Amino acid sequence: MGSVAKRGLQQYLLQLQQHPLRTKAITAGVLSAISDIVAQKLSGIQKLQLRRLLLKVLFGVAYLGPFGHFLHIILDKIFKGKKDTKTVAKKVLLENLTSSPWNNLFFMVYYGMVIEGRPWMQVKTKIKKDYPSVQYTAWTFWPVVGWINHQYVPLQFRVIFHSAVAMCWGIFLNLRARTMALPKAK
């Protein structure tokens, strides 16, 4: 590894140790930005929508990073840091029955109302139409990620790992949440 990259990684790990919440929040924001840039390009947007990008960064910094930070601490306290197969299965099940539905619903509301600026009734219609398939897809994808995360990833790196995978999931959600069929309210 090059000396610049090595120093950067060492500095990042130091920040993660000294300021875990802040580092995870910033990381989630940066990965949300990357996710949104890719999603914008994949959806055919020619000129980068800066307002949308900044609102996605805000979502990552203010919500995703802190939520993940505290979720993993709470799960480790509930299950006393155990990593046996039965405990990991319980963690994955609990995470997928609680935080997964909430996070997907919250993202769809945030995206529709804040990012797209749509009225609640349009957002509600979009959620009724798309939420079941989004959540079903989440339940087929995230348990595997959760298993790997809880079984093999040390606590201090779980949010980082989750955020990196969530970057790809975010592209899926962005493309799914993007409202092309519903005309914008005037």
Image (cartoon, rainbow, N blue to C red):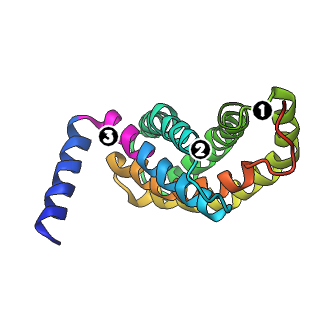
- Residue most toward the front? 47
Residue at the spot of label 3: 23
Closer-to-camera residue (91/184)? 184
Quadrant hosting residue 20: top left
- On the image, the x and y values in percent for residue 183 come to 86, 42
| Distance Cα–Cα, label 3 vs label 2 | 22 Å
Closer-to-camera residue (178/96)? 178
Dominant secondary-structure state across the stretch colored magenta:
helix
Question: Can see residue 134?
Answer: yes
Question: Can see residue 143?
Answer: no
Earlier in the chain: of badge 3 and badge 2, it is: 3
- Write the start and end of the magenta stretch as one range: 19-28
Task: Tell me if residue 112 is in the magenta stretch.
Answer: no
- On the image, the x and y values in percent for residue 53 come to 53, 44
- Residue most toward the left? 3
The quadrant of the rendering that contains the C terminus is: top right
The quadrant of the rendering that contains the N terminus is: bottom left
- On the image, the x and y values in percent for residue 41 come to 60, 62
Mark 1: secondary structure: loop
Labelled pair 1, 2 in contact (Cβ < 8 Å) = no
- Residue most toward the bottom? 1
Q: Residue at x 81, y 54 (%)?
A: 133
Earlier in the chain: of badge 1 and badge 2, it is: 2
Residue at the spot of label 2: 95
Q: Is residue 114 above or below residue 40?
A: above
Labelled pair 3, 2 in contact (Cβ < 8 Å) = no
Residue at the spot of label 1: 118
Mark 3: secondary structure: helix
